[in-house]
Image (spheres, rainbow, N blue to C red):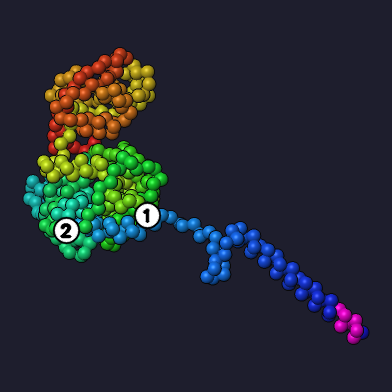
Amino acid sequence: MIKRFVLTAALVSIGVVGGLVLAGRIHVQQDAVALPTDPVTDQAGGGRAGATAPPSPGPDFTAVAERTIKAVTNISAVQVVRQPNSPFANDPFFQYFFGGGDPGEMFGYRNRYESSLGSGVVISADGYVVTNNHVIGENTAEVSVSMGDRRELKATVVGVDSWTDLALLKVEATNLPVIPWGDSSNLKVAEWVMAIGNPFSLNQTVTLGIVSALGRAGMGISTYEDFIQTDAAINPGNSGGALINSRGELIGINTAIYSQSGGYQGIGFAVPSNLARRVIDDLKKYGEVRRGSLGYLDVAPLTTRLAEELRAPNADGIVITQMSRTSSAYRAGLRPGDIIRTINGEAITNTGQFVRQIADTAIGSTVRVEVLRGGKTETVRAQVEKQEPRATRGRRQ
């Protein structure tokens, strides 16, 4: 009995040891397969020098951030808001009985002060700072700029452009850190970019993403739209901040987000650097942006139903809905109901493209407009005039 027990125990021990050895061999063999086949060994550590480093999770923007972050500022602005003194200003019964008139005419007005925060980018060592027009607002009473070295400087407004939602400020300082301009026309979709700003007043916050799309228009954000779309996190307070490429160049001014919650949802928009530079140059020279115009001319997209009514073979182009008799377009022979097909030979596909093309045309020059009228193609030549500063937001050109 004892012999049988001893024999059984010995067989079990041999089986366990054999199992451990087998498992160890399988483990060693798997490790050997995972190692690189390069026979070169590490002389110092005795390991293998040919081992491949783990892949990087993304591009390294640390050096770019170090060079550029101090050139992004915090903008604080105070606006004067004119408000009626009437305690019934928002009372629907008052509006009903007094015919919806202006309560201020009866009770007078008072000034209320509102503050706003945003970001800005230093574009010259002698103190020029670019930001968004909506950051400083209208009827601005005071603007201050907090620099990267925590100095707070008073700023003067050189000029604003509501069409592109850009503004140019000037502070009295020298030897400021600057982000050099880049060429936004060289951007490609899926290229890595970095956004710097002050979201929710968190100074000099850096986020990373890619260029999601180029030439975005028709968003209803501004009159002149040609946005860079990015998924780099942009939140309230980032407005006016910098969008930077991997070479540390300024290729966009962060302007808006698309959001249903008010926060980051992966869709942000920036004004391209090439457009921003043209606007800034005009603001420096003239205090306003000089753009071309054909006078008061309202245009709308051409639908298939409208095209059928106007005897057009398809829905290519845009249609003139109304215009002023004193406009350059009217004097040239354009009329409501005309379908604009091309400008100087370039096909017009949407109203935003039409606005941009006329606005970018030199004042005093002539454009060749091809229209479809009553099913027949005609060409008219219209002189480009200076766009009046009072031009309102929308599709008017």
Where is the C terminus found, in terms of image quarters? top left
Looking at the image, residue 276 lies above or below residue 329: below
Residue pictured at 22% horizontal, 18% vertical: 380
> Relative to 358, is 36 on the left or the right?
right
Give neighbour class at mark 1: few <14, some 14-19, many 20+ (Cα, 10 Å): some
- Residue 20 is inside the magenta segment: no
Task: Identify residue for label 1.
Answer: 208
Residue extent of the magenta highlight: 2-8
Q: What type of secondary structure mainly makes up the magenta span?
A: helix
Q: Quadrant of residue 328?
A: top left
Viewer-closest of 304 and 240? 240
Number of residues whose C-alpha sits closer than 10 Å to that of mark 2, classed few (under 14), some (14–19) or many (20 or more) = few
User: What amino acid type should be assigned to the residue bearing mark 1?
Assistant: Leu
Amino acid type shown at disc 2? Asn
**Residue 45 horizontal/vertical position (percent):** 54, 70
| Pointers 2 and 1 in contact (C-beta within 8 Å) | no
In the displayed structure, would residue 251 be above or below residue 295? below
Tell me if I can see residue 157 in this picture.
Answer: yes
Magenta run includes residue 4: yes
